[in-house]
Image (spheres, helix red, strand yellow):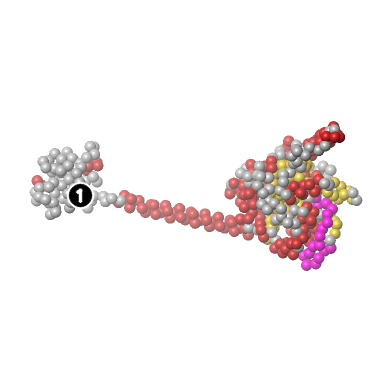
Amino acid sequence: MTDSAGTPADPDLPAGDTPQGRSQEEPGAPDPKEEPEPGAVPENDAPQDSGDEGKADAGEDSEGGGRDGDQHGSDGKSAAGAQTWADHPKDGSASRRKRPWMRWAALGASFLVMISAGVGWWLYKKLDGNITTDTSAAAELKVYEKERPTPVAMDAQNILLIGSDSRSGDNRKYGRDDGGSQRSDTTILLHLAADRKSATAVSLPRDLMVEVPKCRTGDDKETREQFTQFNSAFELGGTACTIRTVERLTGIRIDHHMVVDFNGFKDMVDAVDGVEICLKEPIDDKDARLELPAGRQTLNGEEALGYVRARKTLGDGSDTERMERQQKFLGALVNKMQSNGVLLNPTRLYPVLDAATKSLTTDPGLDSLRDLYDLVRSMRDVPTDQVQFLTVPRQPYRQNVNRDELVEPDASELFKQLREDKPVAVVPADELKKKEGEKEKAQDEKPDDAGSDSGSPTPTPTYSGSSAADDLCEQ
């Protein structure tokens, strides 16, 4: 065929039909907008007889953007050069050229996900493995199940926190080693409200005179029931004996327990970069290994441990005053963790969890990282001013001023409020004395025939204490 005949005729096309590549100015050229006849070959499928490389699409590269006679010669070649159908880029070829890069990117992302998952799993197992499970206490409590209190508020949680005073191993430098025996240096009953809008921590004095029930010792012997100081329960029968003593004293069912030794506390303080306190006077206590100036300062773990354990050189040297100092420091620690976003920042939370779990012994209900995480998560929205600390109402024991006894009916009222998951309030000691004075004055001025106002709501019981929101330097 000659050039005047155009592209080779398709045997299925009627004679004289012109392919769509022709200029619309040629006589008899079909309208480019019309659909091709059945059997017609579209332009992109029609072969071109040019062997030279040109532009990928002459119509797309032209300034006018169309396919007209000004851009194509009579032989079907573009003005920029000839091009065959074999050289014409097929649809999706650019995407295929990019696919190797996409495959590498996907492979790299998958590798990072696998590495992250592996590291995360390793960290989880490490923290989970740090926790020691106290199965013996659970077994003994099961034996005495019939004498234990029945839970009243089902969704509330009562957790007994025990600070171990063992002087063996790493703790030897804090005092005399008595052969590794453990004593309950600090015991706190932590009540978490069912709605998780408040948490109340009640300190139980170690010198409080209480009834200690019969308990099994480590060598499977049974002790006698006795009236003695509270921390003897832990030394005689361990955690289970302490739990049963607290339940008998308060009537509150203990759901879980945690035993933390000195090093766990110290490492937790270091993990949050220290805790700020304020001292009115300097401290120089060789027994507590503590020497601090007066004023606002941040304590590291070693200093914090000495601060909460110091007794002889601070205040009146009483255990009650030391408990109040411990409560305020724990409140400052909670405030530091919440205000700095530790609980919501995995990078900062991991060292805290690592320090806590290494020195933590719990019952089987709290012996996994998942259990502890659920517990912490349920508490993280509690306002700091509703994280309250107080000591059970106590006074010097009438037969020995070096021991304590409960103040009634105040102590029983506190235990009843917690048992029934009802609110309690705490205020500083001086403010409480002021309120009590005003209350007594109002009672004295009240007419004898006024009677009781039964229609008024029962006021929330108020006790001497502090909250995590308190600033230790403003008290």
In the image, is residue 370 above or below residue 386? below
- The residue type indicated by label 1 comes to Pro
Quick check: can you spot residue 220?
yes
Q: Which residue is mark 1?
A: 42
The region drawn magenta spans 205-224
Percent of width and height locating residue 15? 9, 50
Percent of width and height locating residue 221? 80, 67
Residue under the point 83% across and 49% down: 406
Whether 216 is among the magenta residues is yes
Of the 4 image quadrants, the one containing the C terminus is top right
Question: Quadrant of the rendered structure where residue 279 is?
Answer: top right
Residue under the point 74% across and 39% down: 457
Give the crowd class for mark 1: few <14, some 14-19, many >=20 residues within 10 Å: few
Quick check: can you spot residue 330?
no
Residue under the point 72% across and 44% down: 423
Percent of width and height locating residue 230? 81, 54
Percent of width and height locating residue 34? 19, 44
